[in-house]
Amino acid sequence: MTEPSVHLHHVTVRYGATKALNDVTLTIPSGKIIGLLGPSGAGKTTLLRIVVGRLKTDNGQAKILGYPAGSRKLRGRVGYMTQSVSVYPDLTVRQNLRYFATIMGVSWSRIPDYVKEVDLADQAKQLAGTLSGGQKSRLSLAIALLGDPELLVLDEPTVGVDPVLRRKLWEIFHGRATKGTTILVSSHVMDEAAHCDDLLLIRRGRILAHDSPAALCDRTHATTVEEAFLKLVEARR
Amino acid sequence: MSPRRTTATAGRVLRQLLHDPRTLGLIFVVPCALLILVKYVFDGQPTIFNSIEPMMLGVFPLTIMFLITSIATLRERTTGTLDRLMTMPISKLDFVLGYAIAFAIVAAAQALLATWLVIGWLAVPVAAGGLPMLFGAVLGGFLGTSLGLFISAFARTEFQAVQFLPALIFPQLLTCGLIISRDHMASWLQTFSDYMPMTYSVDAMKRVTTETQWSSQLTHDFIIVVAVAIGVLVLGAVTIRRRD
């Protein structure tokens, strides 16, 4: 696998006068868990929406799995979990999955596997609207997993989630990564860094660093990723 | 385009409605209750009632389906489910047609009930018979669905979407010939109403009530309603953006 999963080349995105992404260049190899870390408003969601092809770049190119971002060939090959829980509240867990499975061209016979993977077997017949917040986000994740996409783009999946569920989610992500899936996951909680192979630190639309957690701390003489982040911000001043 | 994805979307929308019995109830109860209300409004004027009531059948399903569809599709846009779908292998037309089919089925059931009420229970004499009347009511509902699908693209919130009802439907209601015959209006308003689809939906109902034969004007009315509905539906698919 020589083709990188994600390759952004001098990507800039503007919302009016502000630059949500400012000349971002990065390459993400396949089969790794990449944490996109930064404060809220840093441009995380914008970057992820570029990758899934929902947003056009104002400048620069985005290539995903070897194709230009947004290409028809990528539809269904990139799993996307939006920040809001994008499920149908007035459908059951199973009905939600069946609908999206049909759209993805995934056989219904595989749905129990996904339900099991996110631990929702007991809730399969429950309306999504009546699920707890954590259960809803797991359903949202299951939908993103349908069809076992090569690239998973997850927008803050662990935010506001209790520690038990957070550990469970990371187990799922690691399980997927060992099968060769590339996972691009955003968070504004720096603690999440420990779970990632590589980190992308982002602030004000710019990438501050792209390194493994250990190398990052080494380089900045920091003990935690949070400290490293602060040092990088200060160094830029 | 994929028939499987279109029908899956239609099935999904219907299943959502089935889990929302109150909405479903309102869809069927409200037009019927209004039609009965009209009966007692014109209690002392049965002749006027007999000519007004069928026209109401060209108005109520259209208005109600417009409102329901515009909110339903707006919700899809604001909750992120459309966002997610647009990264998946579904065409925009599959999505829009799925909605149209689902709500057309609902509109048909609603029209069936309302037509039965008008002819069977309120005993309004209909020269052309029940079938053309039913056809007209279904088309009205379908037109409302298409308009609702299209207009939801221009609303960011439910507050905005709801206001499209007075903004878009009320002017048509006033000028379609329901309140007063169109030749009594200012000539520029007549021209305006010539371009408004509800005019034809209501005109069809007028003809169904008074003409025993299926006239070419009736066909003309129906064709215009269908053509506008389909045209607006395609526009609705265009207004969905795969990439912002």
Image (cartoon, rainbow, N blue to C red):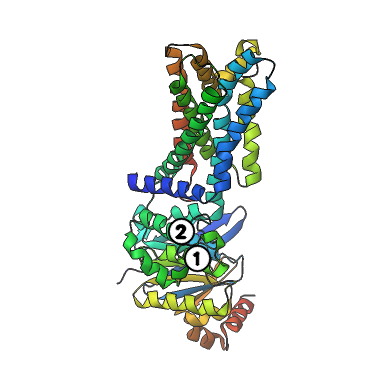
Name the quadrant containing residue B93: top left
Give how far apart the Cα atoms at labels 2 and 1 are. Answer: 9 Å
| Vertical relation: A222 (above or below) B241 | below
Tell me the tag on residue A24: 1
| Vertical relation: B157 (above or below) A47 | above
Tell me the tag on residue A39: none
Indicate the position of residue A222 as horizontal and vertical percent values.
58, 87
| Residue at left offset 56%, top offset 81% | A191
Element under disc 1: strand
Indicate the position of residue A43 as horizontal and vertical percent values.
56, 64
Which chain does the residue under circle 1 lie in? A
Kind of residue at disc 2: Gly
Q: Quadrant of the N terminus of chain B?
A: top left
Indicate the position of residue A129 as horizontal and vertical percent values.
55, 59
| Residue at left offset 61%, top offset 65% | A41
Residue nearer the viewer, A21 or B129: B129
Element under disc 2: strand
| Vertical relation: A221 (above or below) B189 | below
Tell me the tag on residue A60: 2
